Amino acid sequence: MRKYIYSLANLIRKAGFDLKEGSDKRVLEMQKEISKIGKLEFKIEQYPDGTWVAESTNIDGIITGGKTTKNMSATIKDAVFTYFEIPPYLCADSLLKGDNEPVTLTQRVYA
């Protein structure tokens, strides 16, 4: 259900409606908390079968994963929004990543 509400909210934004997510109290609290630590960092492990797990290294309790890396960024953002209890209609990707920020992927190779 969360995924459908998120998708519908994105369609509404694309149609030109402002859901005012940037002024919501919960979103402002999330941004304040992230600002305190500087940035969110994740340790990402990918396994030979293609599955992966991402765990925040600076906020305890944010962990997620998937079967493929295709939607890794969106999955991690969803985990962050869920951790901070942000309703799906307020989950705009722009709230978590600024323009031109690099994304670092750490991958371990097992032999």
Image (cartoon, rainbow, N blue to C red):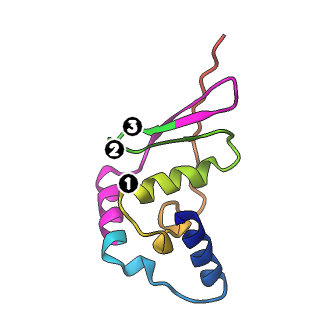
Q: Which numbered disc, 1 or 2, marks the residue closer to the eye?
A: 1
Range covered by the magenta-colored residues: 28-53
Asked if 24 appears above or below 63 in the picture, the reply is below
User: In the rendered image, which residue does mark 2 sit on?
Assistant: 59
User: In the rendered image, which residue does mark 3 sit on?
Assistant: 57
Q: Is residue 80 left or right of residue 32?
A: right
Nearest the viewer among 8 and 37 is: 8
Quote the CA–CA distance across marks 1 and 2.
10 Å
Q: Is residue 89 left or right of residue 3?
A: left
Q: Report x, y in % for residue 52.
A: 60, 34
Asked if the residues shown at circle 2 and circle 3 are in contact, with their CB atoms under 8 angstroms apart, the answer is: no
Could you tell which of marks 1 and 2 lies nearer the N-terminus?
Answer: 2
Q: Name the element at disc 1.
A: helix
Q: Report x, y in % for residue 88.
A: 48, 69
Q: Name the element at disc 2.
A: loop
Q: Is residue 104 left or right of residue 82?
A: right
Q: Amino acid at mark 3?
A: Thr
Image point (35%, 43%), residue name: 61
Quote the CA–CA distance across marks 2 and 3.
6 Å
Q: Amino acid at mark 2?
A: Ile
Q: Residue furthest front?
A: 1
User: In the rendered image, which residue does mark 1 sit on?
Assistant: 83
Image point (36%, 62%), residue name: 85
